[in-house]
Amino acid sequence: MKLTTATLALTLLALPLQANENCSIETLKTAGKAPNPWINLDNRFSPEHLRFGLQSNGHFMPRLRIRAKTAVNLLEPASKPLNLANIKASDPFDQQQRSLNFLLDSRLYADGVLVLQNGKVLSESYRNGLGAEQARLLLGATRPVLSLMGVMAINQGKLQPARSVVHHVPELNQQAAMRKLSIRRLLEGNSQFQWSGAEINDWQLAGGWKSGKAGAGMRAWLKQPGRWEKEWIDGNSTLSETFPEDDLLVWILNETHRASLAQIFCEGVLGSFRPEYPAYWLTDQKGTELSGGLALSLRDLGRFGQMLVDARSTSIRTNIPPWFIETLTASASRGQAAQSGLEGLSKGSESRYGFIRLGGAPNRIAILGPYGNSLYLDFDRQLVVAIYASYPGKHGPAMLATLDQVWSGISREVQISRGNP
C-alpha cells in the first residue's frame, strides 16, 4: 500500500514518542474545535463550563498519553463498606448537622468520591457525568507531584539540593537570580518571585493556557534575558495556582534525568502505584510538559495517595525516602496560627513542598487543587480520600472548611466503626 504524506504524518503521530519495557508515551494533537461553539480555551474553566473543561484536556491543548506497562493494582472492596449518607458533620455555612452526601453535593459540588483504607474501597461514587475511567486535570495540584519527583531525584543522587539552579540548567547561567536560588528552596515552595499580572499573562500564553500569540514556547519564555531579575519574596504561592517557578522545576527535572517529564513520571511514580487507566500530560506547542498539566482518573489519584501512605511503612519497599514523609507530617512549625490562604482548615495547617500538612490530629496531609479537587491522607488510619469536584471558585474558606468536615467525618466514622486508634 502506498502512503500519502498526510497518511504518513497521521501514522507517525500515533506512534509512541518514547517507549521502553515499562512505559509507553504517545503524542496526541489537539482534537480540533470544541464540540460546541460557546466553550473555548479562555472560558473552559468558568463555573458554567467547569465540569466539561476539567475533563476536556484533549480538546484545547496538545497532550501526552502515558501508559505504564505494569499489572494493575486491583482495588478490592472492603468487607464493611462506608455509607456516606449515614455520616453526619457540621455544615460550615450554618453549623447544622447534615450528612456528608449533602455537604459533597450541595456545598462542594462533588463529581466523584473514592475512600480507601488499607488499599481497599470503603466507598466509591460518581455523578454529574464523571466516570471512573475519565482523567481530570489536576492543574495546581500537579505541584506536589513535581516536588515528589524532585525529592526522588535527590534520593537517587541525581539532584543536589544545596546546589543552585544553574548547576543543573547551565543555559540559565546569565541569570544572576538563578545562580543564587538553591534546588532545596525551589522544591520547598515557601517563597516565590514577585510576578506582575502582565508577566503571568505572557507566561500562560507561552504555555498555551490562553489563546493568543504563544511565541516560541515555555522554554524560550523561561530563559529570556532578565526574566528572573526580580524580587524573591517569602510566603507561599497562592493555593491551587501554578507559577513560572513550577515550570522551572520541570526543566530541572528534564535536565537532571536527561528525559522527558512524562518518562520520569511514568518510571518513578505511575508505574509504582500500578494505574488502571492512562495518565495524560498537557504540553505547549513545542511538546514541553507544563507544570499544571497532569490528568489522572479518580481511581488512580487514590492509588497515588495509597502509594504515599504505604511509603511510611518500613515493611514496604518504595522509591520515596522516609525523611520526606516525616517532613510532610511533622508538627506545625508556625504554631497554631492559620497560614494565609488556608483559612477554613484546622489551625496549624501549612504548606510543605506543595502538600498541606493539616492541623489538628497528627499525621494527616492533603493535596489541594482548585475547584475542590483534592486528596486527603491519614497515615495513622491508613485512610485515603480522593475527591473530584466542580466548586465554582478556585479555593476559599467555605470550600476548605467543607473539605475539612468531610475528611473529619470519614475519619471519625472509621475510628468508631472499625476500632482504629
Image (spheres, helix red, strand yellow):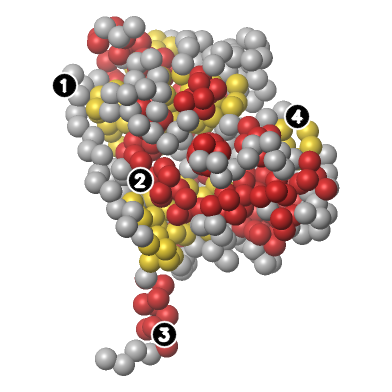
Give amino acid for label 3.
Answer: Ala
Q: Answer few, some or many: residues within 10 Å of disc 2's Cα (few below 14, many 20 plus, some between 14 and 19).
A: some
| Marks 3/2: CA–CA distance | 35 Å
| Marks 3/4: CA–CA distance | 52 Å
Return the mark for residue 79.
1
Q: What secondary structure is marked by label 4?
A: strand
Closest to the camera, between mark 3 and mark 4, is 4
Residue occupying image coordinates x 40% and y 28%? 311
Task: Quickly name the residue at label 4.
Answer: 234
Residue occupying image coordinates x 52% and y 27%? 324
Give amino acid for label 4.
Answer: Asp
Task: Quickly name the residue at label 3.
Answer: 6
| Closest to the observer, 413 or 103 | 413
Instruction: Tell me: residue 410, above or below residue 76.
Output: above
Give amino acid for label 2.
Answer: Gly
Residue 331 at what x, y percent from top left?
56, 13
Closest to the camera, between mark 4 and mark 2, is 2
Dot 1 or dot 4, earlier in sequence: 1
Instruction: Tell me: residue 351, above or below residue 390.
Output: above
